[in-house]
Amino acid sequence: MQSNLNNKISDLEQIEKRVLGPTSTIPVISRSQLRPLRDGRVVVCTSKLNGVKFLLKYNAWGFVRIQREPTYFALYVSRPLSRISYFGEVKNIVYPEDFDSPITKEQASQYEKFKEGKKIIVLKPKSLKRLKEGIPKGPLKKLPQGMRYTTFTKFVNARTTDDL
């Protein structure tokens, strides 16, 4: 089971190297290392493995309809990983046409998920981390569908996605 997880994590590492270059890496941390952060709302978004490229390239997540301003962002990567694998601090939420957007509206329009009115969650510089073991889907299979909110306390203490 552990070697299977290592193979899946290797897939993430390969994507990181392709997007960021061979010398850049995303820091890997355990959730216990997050504990000193202040409490706040965590938005959990979902993605296929390919979606990780967008996250890494722009240090942001798009394109979402979001009402509440979260403090933190987490990304659930579906098959073959099936776990929450990334975590970062939210800087702001913008439209692609906003001045401080990491992506232009023209670039955004090339993505299938882009639709007028959807926003981008921009992360604070250098806050994106890959979770060492992540949060796997639980036996109840309460998988995040679209966006989900949870508390920071629940996030750092969760054994599976069922606990969120």
Image: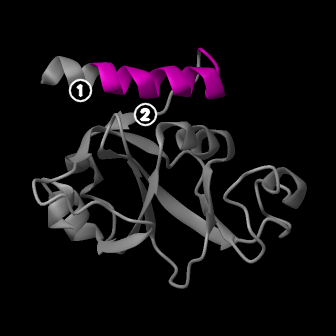
Please say whether residue 20 is one of the residues in the magenta stretch: yes
Q: Quadrant of residue 4?
A: top left
Q: Determine the main secondary structure of the stretch shown in magenta.
A: helix
Measuring from the top left, give residue 87's x and y in whole percent.
41, 51
Q: Residue at x 20, y 49 (%)?
A: 32
Q: Nearer the viewer, residue 39 or 141?
A: 141
Q: Residues within 10 Å of mark 1 (few under 14, many from 20)?
A: few
118 vs 159, left or right, is right
Please say whether residue 28 is one of the residues in the magenta stretch: no
Q: Is residue 25 above or below residue 110?
A: above
Among the two numbered marks 2 and 1 on one chain, the one whose residue lies closer to the N terminus: 1
Q: Residue at label 1?
A: 5
**Image quarter (top left, top right, bottom left or bottom right) of the N terminus:** top left
Q: Quadrant of residue 151?
A: bottom left
Q: Residue at x 62, y 54 (%)?
A: 60
Q: Is residue 28 above or below residue 93?
A: above
* Gap in angstroms between the C-alphas marked 2 and 1: 18 Å
Q: Residues within 10 Å of mark 2 (few under 14, many from 20)?
A: few
Q: Residue at label 2?
A: 27
Q: Nearer the viewer, residue 4 or 36?
A: 4
Q: Amino acid at mark 2?
A: Pro
Helix, strand or loop under label 2:
loop
Number of marks drawn: 2
Q: Amino acid at mark 1?
A: Leu
Q: Nearer the viewer, residue 133 or 35?
A: 133
**Direction bottom: furthest residue:** 67
Q: Which residues are magenta?
A: 7-22
Color scheme of the displayed model: one colour
Q: Quadrant of residue 134?
A: top left
Measuring from the top left, give residue 12's x and y in whole percent.
44, 28
